[in-house]
Amino acid sequence: MAEVVVDGLRIAYRRQGSGPALVLFHGAFEDSRAWARQMERLSPHVEVVAWDAPGCGASDDVPAGWSDANWARTAAGFLSVLGLTRPAVAGFSLGSVLALLLARDHPESVGRLVLVGAYAGWGGSLSPDALAERMAAARFTLEHPVEEWADGFLDSVFAPEDPPERRALARRLLDDWRPRTTAALLPVMAQDLRSDLPRIPVPTVVVRGDADARSPRGAALEICRLLPRARLVEIAGAGHDCTGEELDAVLVAAARAAGEGSSSAVR
């Protein structure tokens, strides 16, 4: 793995391939390893960069008192340090929220968005009862060993038809997750971003597995309605984590479209 320093924070990342750039933001309880197979498949077509978000994988811990602005500024700084000009940015679940914060605060940094298993924050995508349940489940993970909650969590993330090796990888990544990162992310995830979405002009594809048990279909439709330039793609039989091979074409198309836009801007 490589690393860069952004505003004094060490950020680890993986980089593979050549061509138009695609940046991948992983979900909660993960790090860049979650994208390993995707990177192998995509790298013959595009340059793929997957970060370990602050507090995840080999990156430094989340500093105390971080706000939305800190998350967005660090993401924008990460792209800048790597010399990436308006790349496509794809985020899964938690990563979709971070991608929206980046595009909201630094729209000049992003050429295209792909939001997978997306939320406009939990507060903007879940009912009040579902939000309370989600917050309680997250707090449970702070106080109990992973063995007590891993299976239930993974059952909600993967559909029965999803490849078992993806679930197996996700289970391994849970063992390396830092509870302090969950605590730092809860305020980010709990908010309602819907009022911000009409101000995000970036062309966006919202991707949802039609067997998603965590992010409702209505939430994806609402995100598409509120974003000025968004469309929905649904993957049949996929669960919340619909980052399998069916997503590849969407990601490559987004990277190529972003690359064309960047070239035009330069000329």
Image (cartoon, grey):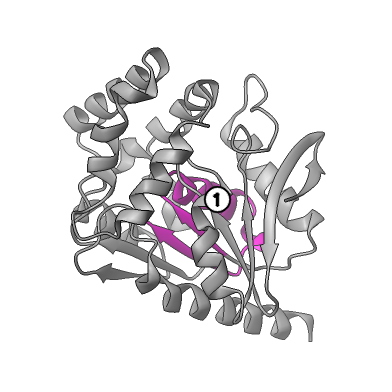
For the magenta stretch, what is the residue range?
Answer: 89-117
Report which residue position mark 1 lands on: 33
214 vs 179, nearest the viewer: 179
Q: Is residue 209 magenta?
A: no
Q: Can see residue 117? A: no
Q: Is residue 36 above or below residue 181?
A: below
Q: Secondary structure at mark 1?
A: helix
> Horizontal and vertical percent for residue 133?
22, 26
The percent coordinates of residue 195 (x first, y second) are 40, 46
Residue 61 sits above or below residue 118 on the image:
above
Q: Position of residue 171 (x, y in %)?
A: 39, 40
Left or right placement of residue 74 versus residue 236 in this view: right
Location of residue 266 (image quadrant)? bottom right
Q: Which residue is more in the foreground, 131 or 181?
A: 181
Q: Image height check: is 135 above or below 20?
A: above
Q: Quadrant of the C terminus?
A: bottom right
Q: Amino acid at mark 1?
A: Arg
Task: Let me know if residue 116 is in the magenta part.
Answer: yes
Can residue 153 be seen?
A: yes
Residue at 60% of width from left, 76% of height from top? Answer: 258
Count numbered badges in the picture: 1
Q: Residue at x 62, y 20 (%)?
A: 65
Residue at image coords 43%, 79%: 249
| Left or right: residue 33 compared with residue 84 | left
Tell which residue pokes out farthest to the top in this image: 143
The residue under the point 77% across, 57% down is: 80
Q: Nearer the viewer, residue 237 or 132?
A: 237
- What percent of the width, then of the height, locates residue 71? 61, 39
Mark 1: few, some, or many residues within 10 Å (few <14, many ≥20)?
some
